[in-house]
Amino acid sequence: MTRLASALRALAATAATLLAVTAAAPGASGATGTSGSAETAGTIGAADTSGVGSGSPTAGPTAPEQFVALRAVAPTIIHDIRYITPHNFMGEPVDGYQQPLCILTRPAAQALQRAQWKLLRQGYSLKVYDCYRPQRAVDHFVRWAKDLEDERMKPEFYPQVDKSRLFTDGYIAEKSGHSRGSTVDLTIVELPAKPTRPYVPGEKLVPCYAPQGERFRDNSVDMGTGYDCFDTLSHTDDPRVRGEQRANRQLLKNTLADVGFTNLPEEWWHFTHKPEVFPDTYFDFPVSWRSVVGH
């Protein structure tokens, strides 16, 4: 059996378990209301919803035809959509995430499929944390950031950052490239993949920059910090990150660069496929299969 065939078999063997864990995660079913941090929106102005079709009154807006569900294009990529669960920097499901789904523009999804095939040959798989992000989710982030009393997730996600500085330091912004559909937060998982243990609301939190064996038990390779870690150690090329952790970051960065993705230097997990299909448009359709049905 070839290494690729072995990787595919290992991935298939873990897929059912991973899907079951995702589906069972708190808030994963019927959430109406989460790497995480949003890059600065630059000079782009107010949100533009041109190109968003109207669904039924109860369904809300739907996505343009250029958007697809990643599962339809690259079914072997693992999903761990954090913002539909309470395990994120806010501690609650995020507005606009109705199903644990990754939605992207078609070119971005197809590029991830090419990257996935490269990694499968090496015994790894991609895992996505967040993809398209509705503007209503970004608005939810902004409301939370302005509530300086709510620091329930501070011990894990921003233990060394004063919440009053989240806007100034660029961790939260009023616009996010995720809302344009070509940006994704992701990591690498060694195969055969182990399921990520369920997060239990109220459990003791450990800093996201703690050693891998101490912080929240994610099934990804060691990247030096957890996902959505508001800390300078999350900077992709931070010189303090060395050895295996640095090699893992470079593997992710180089693999995605080869298929057209550019990394945000402040977040090792954050990549945008260029050229963007919608470089100036911020969408607000919900993250659900209904939004991309028939695409």
Image (cartoon, rainbow, N blue to C red):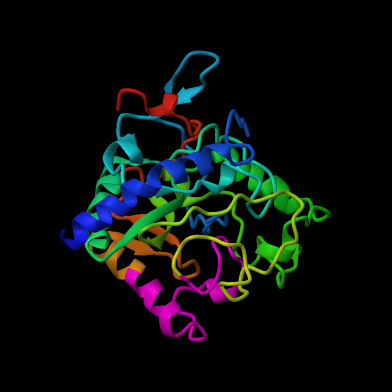
Q: Nearer the viewer, residue 73 or 13?
A: 13
Name the residue located 20 percent from the left edge and 55 percent from the top edge.
5
Q: Is residue 89 magenta?
A: no
Residue 34 visible in this rendered orientation of the protein: no
Q: Is 136 situated left or right of 281 in this image?
A: right
Q: Main secondary structure of the magenta part?
A: loop
Name the residue located 58 percent from the left edge and 36 percent from the top edge.
28
Q: Is 230 situated left or right of 116 in this image?
A: right
Name the residue located 51 percent from the left edge and 54 percent from the top edge.
41
Give the x, y percent position of residue 288. 47, 30
Q: In the rendered image, which quarter contains the N terminus? A: bottom left
Q: Nearer the viewer, residue 59 or 192?
A: 192
262, above or below 199, in the image? below
Give the x, y percent position of residue 266. 50, 69
Q: Nearer the viewer, residue 191 or 129?
A: 191
Give the x, y percent position of residue 34. 58, 46
Q: What's the magenta region?
A: 222-251
Number of callouts: 0
139, above or below 188, in the image? above
Give the x, y percent position of residue 21. 52, 43
98, above or below 223, in the image? above
